[in-house]
Image (tube, coloured by chain):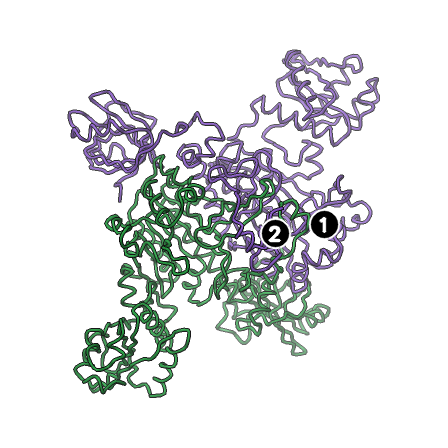
Chain colours: A purple, B green
Amino acid sequence: MYRSHNCGELNASHINTEVTLAGWVQKTRDKGFMIWVDLRDRYGITQLIFDSERTDAAVFEMAKTLGREFVIQVKGTVIERESKNKNMSTGDIEILVSELSLLNAALTPPFTIEDETDGGEDIRMKYRYLDIRRNPVKNSLLFRHKVTMEVRKYLSDLDFCEVETPYLIKSTPEGARDFVVPSRMNEGQFYALPQSPQTFKQLLMVGGMDKYFQIVKCFRDEDLRADRQPEFTQIDCEMAFVEQEDILNVFEGLTRHLLKEIKGIEVDKFPRITYDYAMKTYGNDKPDIRFGMEFGELNEVAQHKEFAVFNNAELVVGIAAPGCASYTRKEIDNLIDWVKRPQIGATGMVYAKYELDGSIKSSVDKFYDQDDLQNWAKATGAKPGDLILVLSGPANKTRTQLSALRMELATRLGLRNPEVFAPLWVVDFPLLEFDEESGRYHAMHHPFTSPKPEDIALLETEPGNVRANAYDMVLNGNEIGGGSIRIHDKATQQLMFKYLGFTEEEARNQFGFLMDAFQFGAPPHGGLAFGLDRLVAILGGQETIRDFIAFPKNNSGRDVMIDAPSAIDDKQLEELHIRLK
Amino acid sequence: MYRSHNCGELNASHINTEVTLAGWVQKTRDKGFMIWVDLRDRYGITQLIFDSERTDAAVFEMAKTLGREFVIQVKGTVIERESKNKNMSTGDIEILVSELSLLNAALTPPFTIEDETDGGEDIRMKYRYLDIRRNPVKNSLLFRHKVTMEVRKYLSDLDFCEVETPYLIKSTPEGARDFVVPSRMNEGQFYALPQSPQTFKQLLMVGGMDKYFQIVKCFRDEDLRADRQPEFTQIDCEMAFVEQEDILNVFEGLTRHLLKEIKGIEVDKFPRITYDYAMKTYGNDKPDIRFGMEFGELNEVAQHKEFAVFNNAELVVGIAAPGCASYTRKEIDNLIDWVKRPQIGATGMVYAKYELDGSIKSSVDKFYDQDDLQNWAKATGAKPGDLILVLSGPANKTRTQLSALRMELATRLGLRNPEVFAPLWVVDFPLLEFDEESGRYHAMHHPFTSPKPEDIALLETEPGNVRANAYDMVLNGNEIGGGSIRIHDKATQQLMFKYLGFTEEEARNQFGFLMDAFQFGAPPHGGLAFGLDRLVAILGGQETIRDFIAFPKNNSGRDVMIDAPSAIDDKQLEELHIRLK
């Protein structure tokens, strides 16, 4: 044992104890006759003191040579500190060192190992092992562990069984691009890495496993956007003999448990809203409901007047920004410029200030009188002191624009407090969505999602209006989980593949095993998957997932620390029966 | 909810309760006026009764049509059973059915869904989802979950943090063959799937994570032998600021905890033997010590007589088979034939029967008198009634042969009871082993293993005799875990790569990141990894790992259920910048 205690546990109760500690030199202060060293390990920081009068001369001299991040072992006595530090658990004591061993020297680190570092993203990623020494990253990884332990305990106590599904599976063209693995033993053939264990968990239900979960890596070879990783982790779950209501209850329970255990927060029963309601009310299928600013549709009250812009629009829709009636012309112009940015794409914005005296002043006063504007206030829920902001145009596009504005305003107004948690369910998602590029319908969730029985008849006539037994859990404006009740009979699954444009042969080749399985006694089943990286980031009160992943990849899918991917030997290519192009 | 109770929980206390159950039809017995159905789910079997007098006629008629593995839902009343079945938890009751819904019909399964099935390995793998319905497989998966939960709880309670390391890493030619993944975004480059998270866990130690574990999939593209899978699961662990003793204590504690929690067995402190001792005493570095039959070396007492075979042998070594002095000539000939099989390769075997009257009769009586043979008995620990079996020849080869014979005898004598657990540590493994094929030394464990400091001087002169700080945990003749104290300074690591035949450039290209990391304050560290598949199989009292893996691959690395690997589109190859050869 290199230590009797760690660097976070000693306090006044240990005074006069002989201890051995080991760790990294966080910093040294050399006052000539006295040297203080902050010794750091995973558990905390303990102050060491080398005293020219009380410390052996050789040890004292050696202490002078210690640099940042040197790894040392010390023996000494716990003594009371003269100037106590109330902000540290070890702040009442220090170690009067009697022996010092250098376990490993260190080059000067390329960035400071402090909570606020001077290192940019690139250098921190290249030296990720140094970055992990910093509290924000280290604590994020410890936090992630705590969350996964709680998830496992909770589900295990409910009789869920964690089953490992294979990583070397079969490539299917549906969905995102697969990462593939050439097979040496099966010439010309490839495995694929799973985008999710979807079909395997369904087969486990056919196999009678009843309640399954797995915390599992998944892989998607997509062009990377910020905060998306080629490999990511899911909490993957499935249950048999359940209806949607059962699934929602179980995983609402899990989420409530996490909020309570991890954050100490009790939340009410989650609101449930339909996809249609979410789109109409928030312009978004993952609404942030930590704040209001719900959409008010103004077609009835704002059209059929003299204002052509509104009259010609498919949708006129507004929100009430709380307390913003006092915005200056400049502030409002800034918002108008913001919505007109190409990323948002609005052509203009109308506003109306609901003054504290009850009057309303709008940018379109010549078309609308006070009665009209009071109707706007009513529709948007505006109160005196609020600023009504109105966009118009094609319905879907306008809703998306207003949703962006709503989120931007909430951010500016400080309404997106990361320590407030507002979960909800969005249900009744459409089964299909039309893809302009391929000119056909795609499964919005995946091809195994069941349509609502009462909507099946619409599949032929209005496929876009068929609702699915599909649901998302949304937390603070993020989709953190989603799932569905699955199809569990062969005929419906075949029909679904047909509607999705599979030939019979394609469906058979790719998913024959699943349809076969459905013929041997498949129970009704359904489930969902949480995105773990995002979930822990949100629970941790952070915007980005990267600090919650030990060794993330950059936006080109590279691990810059180990320099991967990289070229491989010709011999390897040969054995795998492939060549470079 | 499709059910109010599961099929394993109802008993006499529920009599007269109205219940709803759902599950699979295990079997039906139609007596004309009465139909019994065994309804099965994950939790058990409950007997249903349809009575022509008490059950609605339509329901009764429908019950007649139920086939094996149909999925049904029933409502009914719990009643007392006339002929109780004491072997079932639900054996006191049955359900008098009032309502019956067919949830899904089923084709006749291709093999019987019973504990002892009529299905061969191939058909069971193709329909693995049906195989999983069988108790032996289902219970193995539930058992695996229980083991992993206990591992996680134990380590987590000791402050170990589970950290997910990446799956898309870098290919290195050292060790087994990598599975590789062509990169679409980085033309001509490949990721590799990890053979283990070895370097990442070491970087986590450099990063101050202190105590790490992970239950993680690993990948090796090796030719598959029976019971080896291309993807397998490790319990991977690493600790900083530790010596070998600390690691052994922690993971001995874990294993003892598992034996206690999972099997209800308390084991003593694990014996620790050196690699040299293991080879000399058992001919094997993973000895099964559930039984004795330790090797007795006979060179001193059996050489320098008239028997040329022994005189010319490098090693004469024997074991005492307990109670086997009564073997007939035929039984002994059978053993001699067994050791002469090509797989074992002995040229002959000498035996000596230690009769109950104290006399010893050997197959080489003309060369050895009773005093000689008494010395043999002493060396092999034979007692009256035992059969001494002696092999001779080149030392290593002969030990391996005798080890095989020892195991075979133990099996025949029923000494390998799967419900007896005899764990031990084997320590002081050689650092290097000579590879005849490449004509150079390879790392026996891996290139990151530290040599014993007192042996470093031998690296130049007798590399084969350098001992490593490496250890294996052995359980019932299987290596279930192994690890080492690692090198943690750049100079030693560089030296090690040199001795292993790496050029400086190769070492730099492949492991530069690790040697860089060692320069920034690497703590002393070490760890180990358990093979989870094997561990759960042994704890479960089984010989083969396959039933403990939900979806195993066959010996050609194929998943015959989903038919993977398979061909992929030309478009995919194109995007990945590769061609088939």
Q: Is residue A317 left or right of residue B281?
A: right
Residue A444, image quadrant: top right
- The amino acid pointed to by label 2 is Gln
Q: Residue at x 29, y 60 (%)?
A: B275
Q: Residues within 10 Å of mark 2 (few under 14, many from 20)?
A: some
- The amino acid pointed to by label 1 is Pro
Q: From what the image shows, is residue A52 above or below residue B293?
A: above
Q: Which mark is residue A198?
A: 2
Q: Is residue B468 visible?
A: yes
Secondary structure under tag 2 reads helix
Q: Residue at x 68, y 59 (%)?
A: A512
Q: Residue at x 26, y 63 (%)?
A: B277
Q: From what the image shows, is residue B437 above or below residue B87?
A: above
| Mark in the foreground, 1 or 2 | 2
Secondary structure under tag 1 reads loop
Q: Residues within 10 Å of mark 1 (few under 14, many from 20)?
A: many
Q: How many marks?
A: 2
Q: Is residue B252 left or right of residue A511?
A: left
Q: Is residue B79 left or right of residue A402?
A: left
